[in-house]
Image: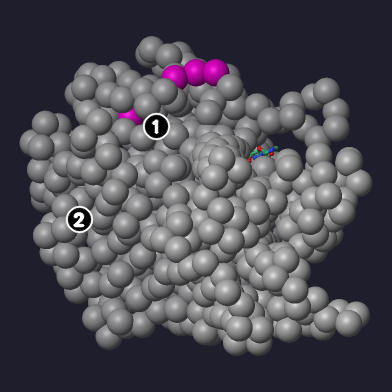
Amino acid sequence: MTRTARDHAIEVRNLTRVFPAGGTDTVVRANDDLTFSIPRGQVFGLLGANGAGKTTLVSQLLGLMRPTSGEIVVEGIDAVNRPDEVKAMTGYLPQTGLSMRLVEVRRALHYTGRLRGQGEADTRRQTAELIDELGLGDVKDRYVDQLSGGMTRLVNFGMALMGRPKLLVLDEPTNELDPHNRRLVWDMVSRRSAQDGTTVVLVTHNVLEAESAVDQVAVMNGGRITAMGTPGHLKEALGDRIRLELFVRDDHPLEHRERELFGAVGTLTEGKRDGSYLVQTDSARMPDLMRLVHGELGMDRVSDFRLTRPTLEDVYLTLDGRSEPGAGPEPGGGPDADRTPAGAGAAGAAATAAVPAAPPASPPAGPAPAAAAGAPAAVLTATDEEAPAPAVAEAERPAAAVSAPRTGPDAAAAAAVPAAPAHGIAARVRRMGVDLKYLWLEQMLEVRTTWSWVLMFGLLMPAAMVFGLTRIGNGLSDEQSLLFIVSGAAIFSVANEGIGTLAQRIGVLRQDGMMVYYASLPISRISFLAAMVFSRLLLILPGLITPMITAKLMYDTDFVISPALLIVLPLSCMALSAIGLAIGTLVRSMDLLLVIVNLMIFVLLLVAPVLIPIESLPVPLQVFGYLLPPTYAAESLRLALMGDFGTTFLLNIAALSAMTAVGLAGANRWLRWRTA
Ligand code: ATP
């Protein structure tokens, strides 16, 4: 059947992505002129050794990375220029853990649904369905970070499925899962693709497992696709071959004469375990092989044997660029060997095979060319019109997956359409409000377990500062000194929680690879940053108020407590938090970040007009002081406590507002929503 562009969920044309190769003029071509299409409703496996370029490719498909050149169209949308629209229809399960670790399982699913643009009723319904389908009922009220690695992976898989996305990108979805849950995941993937027409891009090293799950496979090597087709087609490319895995009883090696006999029938390779062998040969030699096993060796010498057709792993090992041409796979580990994931020993296995490897070639646009010399025809990289129909793979898929219509308009229509990105100002503002609410809730819930310590610090630190500083020398209990000590202690507290904690929080999110979760959602960066800032307000405010209470209790001060404090206090929190965010997003090294933050809090504040009257500072420090937001926060707090709401007060408020805006704009600019 000839497919048209309308049947394709993903079309990639001449996609190239290069990275500078650290310190030299050369570049790494992580993706090198890739051209291919994925029909709608297919499960598309992306295989390849470490560094082959798989992550780079999916990052670009998801709009998380900008290509150096080339085009990506996802469901008719230009993914390079309209990434948010692609994110709205895509569920992504990265290899690294997702965020939402310190919330309950049901909340992680619910919040993800809302952040992906689903309505409340639909989100609740789907959350309940997914908890049921994934068997998470017993743990739905537990924090995600208290679950085992496998259960966490299941929750993350559920988060990727929220909103019934048209496109699912799954990076090693069955890592850490037990066999039962692996089966569950593959069944759910098959159901989504068969019944909803969901297109699934599956990145995996687990070739044996992928074989039963995928319709079409692309093998990547050195940034290029070296083979693409259904598993059946790719295996056919190895020729009419059979493979015998042989395990000799008690792990005894074959004798010299026996080796010669097997070697005469096919290619004999030793397995990793003593007494295990792989023999590969033409299927016509099957009777000879059986005769050798049964007649020459005798069943008393044989502990176990398996006679199979070539596996997808054989294809992969032939094409991944690391095996010798003519190399084949290792035999399985033994009679009881787990033939799933790592047991495959895939890429690292040195082996022998009889089929020449296809030369690296990027799939050309238009009809595939005639087979390159030595390259089996089915290993040709298929493109739009040439994409092999999934017929072969369908024969190998679970019945449930085959029975329902897989592609075409019906299936596309069956897929629940996720909420489209909001258009129009009112809709956008509403959407940003929802994003802000759920991101804020997540941040607030994340500090549930530590808030009492944060609060204690916020109360004790400023109180201790007031107590200690007012006892320096002969005591600084005059009204003027008290004002500086109270405002200085308050601003130190805000700087610590706002600048310090937020800068480090962004650094940790980035370092742990969790930023990719937020970046893969169709949310605005501003909502994310604003949620971060607002989540600090409640934690910071007590630290701002404590110094005033301490001073009142110790010295019965006569400060003016006016409604203006309702502006000064939150604005100070926001300005300093925004600066913290900007630093956290700008500085990439965690170590440098810590140095800068500590410098700002403990060194710069002590030589700025925060605790010290400006006239007591040398002119350079006066000028320098007015570049720092804490100066304005401290001065506006002092003026408010004195009841002086004149021009200077207003200028300070304006400066704080401007610094909040500049900090947020800087963080918005520097936050890597798109990696590299
Ligand atoms: P793995 O299976 O190990 O995850 P992969 O197939 O996903 O590998 P990529 O992560 O896409 O491979 O990397 C492809 C190549 O691009 C590698 O050589 C890698 O070093 C390089 N690369 C990827 N990201 C960057 C980056 N940000 N800067 C420089 N080089 C990069």
Residue sitting nearer the eye, 259 or 159: 159
x, y percent for residue 333: 58, 72
Residue in the image at 30% along x and 19% along y: 385
Q: Residues within 10 Å of mark 2 (few under 14, many from 20)?
A: some
In the rendered image, the quadrant that contains the C terminus is top right
Evaluate if marks 2 and 1 touch, with contact meaning CB atoms under 8 Å apart: no
Q: Which residue is mark 1?
A: 83
Judged left or right of residue 343, residue 137 is left
In the image, residue 70 lies in the stretch drawn in magenta: yes
Res. 262 image quadrant: bottom right
State yes or no: residue 433 in magenta: no
- Label disc, if present, on residue 191 of the rendered structure: 2
Q: CA distance from mark 2 to mark 1?
A: 27 Å
Q: Specify whether tag 2 is near ligand 1 (CB below 8 Å).
A: no
Residue 393 appears at what percent x and percent y? Answer: 29, 44
Residue 373 sits in quarter? top right
Magenta residues, as a range?
69-74
Does 171 sit left or right of 479 as displayed? left
Q: Observer-nearest residue: 320 or 599?
A: 599
State which image quarter holds ligand 1: top right
Lower sequence index among marks 2 and 1 = 1
Residue at screen point 16% across, 52% down: 119
Q: Amino acid at mark 1?
A: Pro
